[in-house]
Image (cartoon, rainbow, N blue to C red):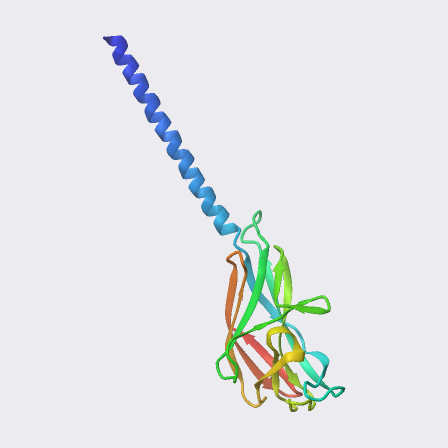
Amino acid sequence: MDFYLSLLSYLNEMWEDLIFQILLVIFGAVIGILINHYTNIPFLKITGTSQPIQLTLEAQEEPNFFYAVNAYRINVSNNKKCKFFGDAAKGCLCEVKYNNAPLDKFRLPWIYGNNTNMTMDINSENDGDIDFCARCVNTGMPFNVGELIAPLNGDYNRAQKIGDGRNPITGKIKITSENRGFVERNFVITPIENNQLQLIFE
């Protein structure tokens, strides 16, 4: 009788220990999944704007007629959430919505070498630049001096007017990646002297 009682007690202790180990493994797996899910989401951040870049563009409605603009780019970085974990931001897409401009939401291009792409991969601890907007320095059909333009869905060859250069423009920019990372900021574009712009991201 004592033997059977001892055996039952031993089996009960083993069963409790087995259940505890199974629960420990499940708990560890859940924590691991949560850590992986959190750390592998790209951490996108708008880090700043460029000084005005002088570009010479060909007028859309008058071939061989060129005009100058002060163009501005924004820099977007993909930082690590912690020291040992980070993931590339894949297929990043930039969309802009203006509150008081004649255009609806549209996409802006990334700078890739001497070309522009609508999407871009950003490795962890790297960054990329987006063509954001420009202000005309001289007249170029169909734009006039001081007007604000943006590279609609491609590049400045398909630029669209977003402002007359007399009033600030407000809106929202959102940059998303295929693997869940994103950054969203409100902005104000203010025309200043010498046909330049002040860009503020809130």
State the image quarter where residue 59 is shown. Answer: bottom right
Label count reads: 0
Residue located 60% across and 62% down the image:
77
Tell me if residue 91 comes above or below residue 73 in the rendering: above
How far from the left and from the top, in percent, is residue 148?
60, 84
Tell me if residue 192 comes above or below residue 181 in the rendering: below
Quadrant in the picture for the N terminus: top left
Q: Which of 186 and 118 is in front in this view?
A: 118
Whether residue 22 sits left or right of residue 109 in the image: it is: left
Q: Which of 17 and 104 is in front in this view?
A: 104
Residue located 42% across and 34% down the image:
25
Whether residue 8 sits left or right of residue 175 in the image: it is: left
Outermost residue to the right:
64
How far from the left and from the top, in percent, is residue 197?
61, 82
Outermost residue to the left:
1
How far from the left and from the top, in percent, is residue 134?
64, 81
How far from the left and from the top, in percent, is residue 160?
60, 82
State the image quarter where residue 92 is shown. Answer: bottom right
Whether residue 63 sits left or right of residue 197 in the image: it is: right
